[in-house]
Image (tube, rainbow, N blue to C red):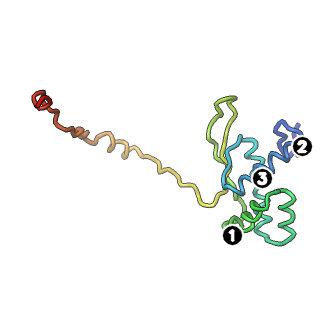
Amino acid sequence: MRHRTRTRKLGMKTAHRQAVLRNLITSLMEHGRVLTTLPKAKEAKRLADKMVTLAKNGTVHARRQVLAFIKSKEAVNNLFGDIAQTFADKNGGYCRVLQTGCRQGDGASMSILELAKEPLERKKAVTSTQTAKKQSAPVKPIASEPVPSSTDANA
């Protein structure tokens, strides 16, 4: 039974898992989005949200806590600069996981982990009246250039 078991082990030992998640979050803070497997993305999302919350605090102690986890100073500066200002008025939900499909080689479910700086645009639902209008619209013939006659080609 998995009662109160918080973390996913991801089939790795502790040190390897921590290194993979640190690298994922560092890449996320540098580039804004990362393509990875779904379980890794879900686990990294938890930690990335904690890093953004610390960055919003903005104290020296918070910066040192983030530097203990993320080893790249460029990523930490980006996190405390641009990313913290972007999410200053938002309370949680700083990252999103978008499922993309399965990997070709082994069939692992892949996803994109990205910072939710702007909301996703929802596709407008197509109603039955809109589909009826599309089906009843007349088909326009394709305009083609006149075909040259054989006498024009020889001349």
Q: Earlier in the sequence, mark 2 or mark 3?
A: 2
Q: Amino acid at mark 3?
A: Arg
Q: Position of residue 133 (x, y in %)?
A: 32, 44
Q: Please, which residue is most extreme toward the bottom here? A: 59
Quarter of the image for the N terminus: give it: top right
Q: Earlier in the sequence, mark 3 or mark 1?
A: 3
Please tell me which residue is depicted at 84% across the width and 43% down the height of the picture: 17
Residue assigned mark 1: 85
Please tell me which residue is depicted at 78% across the width and 49% down the height of the picture: 23
Q: Position of residue 97 (x, y in %)?
A: 67, 48
Residue assigned mark 2: 14
Q: Earlier in the sequence, mark 1 or mark 2?
A: 2
Please tell me which residue is depicted at 85% across the width and 40% down the height of the picture: 9
Q: Nearer the viewer, mark 3 or mark 1?
A: 1
Residue assigned mark 3: 46
Quarter of the image for the C terminus: give it: top left
Please tell me which residue is depicted at 79% across the width and 54% down the height of the picture: 47
Q: Which secondary structure, mark 2?
A: helix
Q: Amino acid at mark 2?
A: Thr
In the image: residue 146, left or right of residue 111: left
Q: Which mark is residue 18?
A: none
Q: Amino acid at mark 1?
A: Gln
